[in-house]
Amino acid sequence: MSLMTIKIDNCIFPTNYLYDIQNFTWADFNYNNVEKDLANEYKLVKVGIMPILSYIAGNIRKIKLKQIGETIIQGKSIGTIESMSYFGVIRSPISGKIIETNNDLLTNPKRVNDSPFESGWIAKIQPLDPKNLESLQSIDQCKIELSKLIKKFNVKCFKNYPDFEMYELGTECSATLAKLDDFMDKKMEVGQIVHLVSDDPTADLEVSRWTDENKQEMLEIIMEKNSLRSNITNYLFHILIKKLN
């Protein structure tokens, strides 16, 4: 069943999750995975990190998770994430006992970047006291603060998180495309994604033409007003390109 979501700036958030704004984490109390023990039933809560944290971290290369059976306290570590330039603690939004961890992340940590609310979940927890959740907020309660955080950290919520970055500002598109062609040929493997940032006003059209001619895939374009220039009609183009050959 698909999630009910709301778009805040360029990011999508599920509307039925609760959020820990301070620690950039979420808790899904509507996740029903009922385990039975001598006719007793309890409800598990799925938890994970927000795309704001996954963007701040960058391309996540390594994840460590606490052991199943451990009891963790709200706000304390449930694991760590690591990239080339970032190391940080994942702080649990609730207190409880860890029943299951997402072991797929150990071999594919980038899944947290690509799908932080779905396949990139972190753990399933049996709550100690589900009523003691004063610090968690619904999307309606925190959407203004989320918007402020997205702007503060200049978060881009891409459909697929890039493996590489190319910033070509003040460069004509023809020169940018020559660099892109060389970069993809020498540095990238098939299936990897590059995030190209360009302020050339024709970048969207020229890159689209280039990907068609070179049989690559343009995944997404995000237009952003360029705050570095006074002309409000000038934009930055954030373009995601996937290498197919």
Image: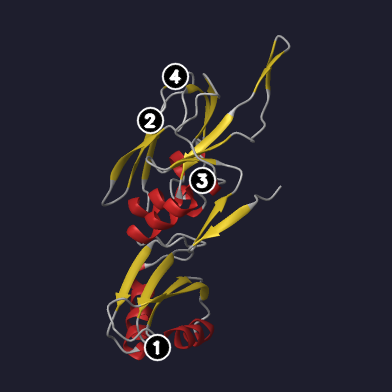
Q: Which residue is mark 2?
A: 75
Residue 12 pos. (x, y %)? 54, 56
Distance (Cα) linking label 1 and label 2: 45 Å
The residue that label 3 is drawn on is: 141
Which is closer to the viewer, label 3 or label 2? 3
Residue 62 percent coordinates (x, y): 36, 43
What distance separates the C-alpha of mark 4 from that of mark 3? Answer: 31 Å
Percent x, y of residue 177: 37, 84
Residue 2 as seen in the image, left or right of residue 88: right
Residue at numbered disc 1: 201
Among numbered discs 1 and 3, the one appearing first in the sequence: 3
- Choose mark 2 or mark 4, whichever is in front: 2
Q: Residue at x 28, y 43 (%)?
A: 87
The CA span between labels 1 and 3 is 38 Å
| Circle 1 or circle 2, nearest the eye | 2
> Which one is closest to the eye, mark 1 or mark 3?
3
Marks 3 and 2 in Cβ contact (< 8 Å): no
**Amino acid type, label 4:** Glu
Q: Earlier in the sequence, mark 3 or mark 2?
A: 2
Helix, strand, or loop for circle 2? Answer: loop
Marks 4, 1: nearer the viewer = 1
Determine whether the residue tagged by mark 3 lies in a helix, strand or loop: helix
Do the residues under discs 1 and 2 have CB atoms within 8 angstroms?
Answer: no
Distance, label 3 to label 2, CA atoms, is 20 Å
- According to the image, label 4 marks what residue? 70
Q: Secondary structure at mark 4?
A: loop
Which is more toward the observer, 182 or 92?
92
Residue type (three-letter) at the residue carrying disc 1? Pro
Is residue 226 depicted above or below 174 in this figure?
A: above
Look at the image and name its color scheme: secondary structure
